[in-house]
Amino acid sequence: MAQLLTGQFIAGGDGIQLSSDGRFIEAPSGDRLPVKNPVTQAVMGTLHIYSPADIDAAVDRARLAVSAWSDRPLSERAALLHRWADRIHADAQPLADVLMDEIAKNAQDALDEVHRSADYIHYTAEEALRLHGEALLSDAFPGQRRNKISLTSRVPVGVVLAIPPFNYPINLAVTKIAPALMMGNTVIVKPPTQGAFSGLNIIALAYDSGIPTDALIPVIGPGSTTGDVLVRHQFINLVSFTGSSETGAHIAQQVKMVPLQLELGGKDAALVLPDADINRAADHIVSGAFAYSGQRCTAVKRVLALASVADLLNPALVERVERLTVGTPSENAIITPLISMASADYVWDLVDEAVQQGAKPLTPLQRDGSLIYPIILDHVELSMRIAWEEPFGPVLPIIRVSSVPDAIEVANRSEYGLQAALFTKDIAQAIQIAEKLDVGTVQINGKTSRGPDHFPFVGTKASGMGAQGVRHSLLAMSRVKSVVLNL
């Protein structure tokens, strides 16, 4: 039984699963799931796929551990999470190296994700200490005497199922794990296949920091099989999922009477008004559209502008796109290979179809396997799929609209409602337009973006369900309990 020792990392390991004491060991048999390096296409290692019996055993361990974990003083839980965050900070570079190999995130972005995740854990541990209950007196309601007091507090929901996505396998894991643990829940984590090594590494560091192995348990396998078994499991008490809208809708149909926290897809629009600062808008749109090759739910995925504005904006966008570096993660390139060849094929098909239907490329259409060079398409019509579908790649469609009300209508017609960016010097007008946009967040004179992580993060329509952000996640992963004193 080869235990994972402190400070060692498992990228490139083979057949990883959990032993009875919760440590990682090599599985001698069973179905395996390969993890490929998106740049080289070489197999980094294989993962043991959990059987239904393995899943039952893991969930049962988590269920039986809720009482012991939630009984620990809140300050003690916070201290363990602070220790975990410190370990992640200390091992940031090797963790970032695994991210680079596993999901083709560039060197700086990978390191930023690791440090941001540790900062999130620290902040969450502190914020949980500041949550307070309340006391309510009965005579505040008409017709009642002052003979009862309701003492309210927040208690754990039980076992939380956390399913993070491939594009932020560390950060979007800890945004689920940390609030769940702080509120006294135990956690089952199903890492993405592409990103599983990164997820297992931070769980190993959690164990080394003193977080009990029964309070945080990874389960490995494809979403279509392992994921379905988990979300339908009778002892899962809350599901927190980040991923595609299609999968989110499927999960919502599978669960019964279980709270959901869903962070799904987006088709985030940048509305550029005639009085906008064109250079500022171009800076934010290019950064928002092409960081991590556009593989972000909060990426700018379309520009809505009057024809006169587009004619001024386009040269500024092209100039900035031409400065984007294209290459490998180790070169710290902005544009790196997409997560899989299938993803690249989907993006390329959307672009090719739009061009065949009349869209005008403003940048060269260039592809090298799963590496797609940044693309700007002008004169995208509403009849084209790329006007509505989320490419999750380095492509930016420009849709010319007839008026500001037309831009609002086109933005709202999308099935998605995650974020929108609005560029204008008229703040009063910006606030009025923001109120009309059916999205969770409107960024005024800035790119669409998830953070800072203590801000509320919300999606409407097919973009999600429930609010995130540190405090909102703490509240979501707990429930109100009232104790009434009869005087």
Image: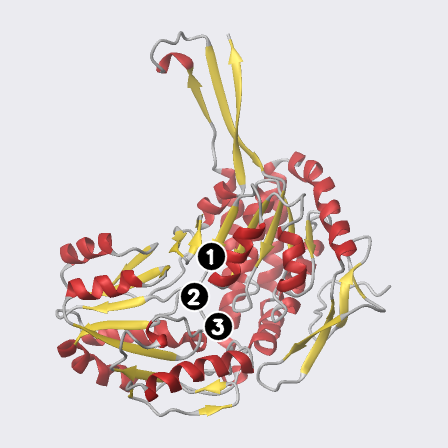
Q: Residue at x 82, y 53 (%)?
A: 20
Q: According to the image, label 2 marks what residue?
A: 297
183 relative to 400, above or below: above
Circle 2 residues within 10 Å: few <14, some 14–19, many ≥20: many
CA–CA distance in space, label 3 to label 2: 16 Å
Percent position (x, y) of residue 192?
Answer: 61, 65
Mark 3 or mark 2, which is nearer to you? 2
Q: Are marks 3 and 1 in contact (CB under 8 Å)?
A: no
Q: Where is residue 133 drawn, in percent x and y?
A: 47, 29
Q: State how far apart marks 3 and 1 are (Cα).
A: 21 Å
Residue 137: quadrant of the picture: top left
Element at label 1: strand
Q: Residue at x 45, y 45 (%)?
A: 472
Q: Earlier in the sequence, mark 3 or mark 2?
A: 3
Q: Is residue 445 visible?
A: no
Q: Earlier in the sequence, mark 3 or mark 1?
A: 3
Rendered image quadrant of residue 183: top right
Residue 284 x/y as whole percent: 30, 72
Q: Which mark is residue 109?
A: 3
The amino acid type found where label 2 is placed reads Cys
Residue under numbered circle 1:
263
Near mark 1 (Cα within 10 A), the count class, few <14, some 14-19 or many ≥20, is many
Pick the front one: 376 or 102: 376
Q: Earlier in the sequence, mark 2 or mark 1?
A: 1
464 w.r.t. 384: above or below: above
Of badges 3 and 1, the one in the foreground is 1
Task: Tell me if 452 is positioned left or right of 69 in this view.
Answer: left
- Local SS, label 3: helix
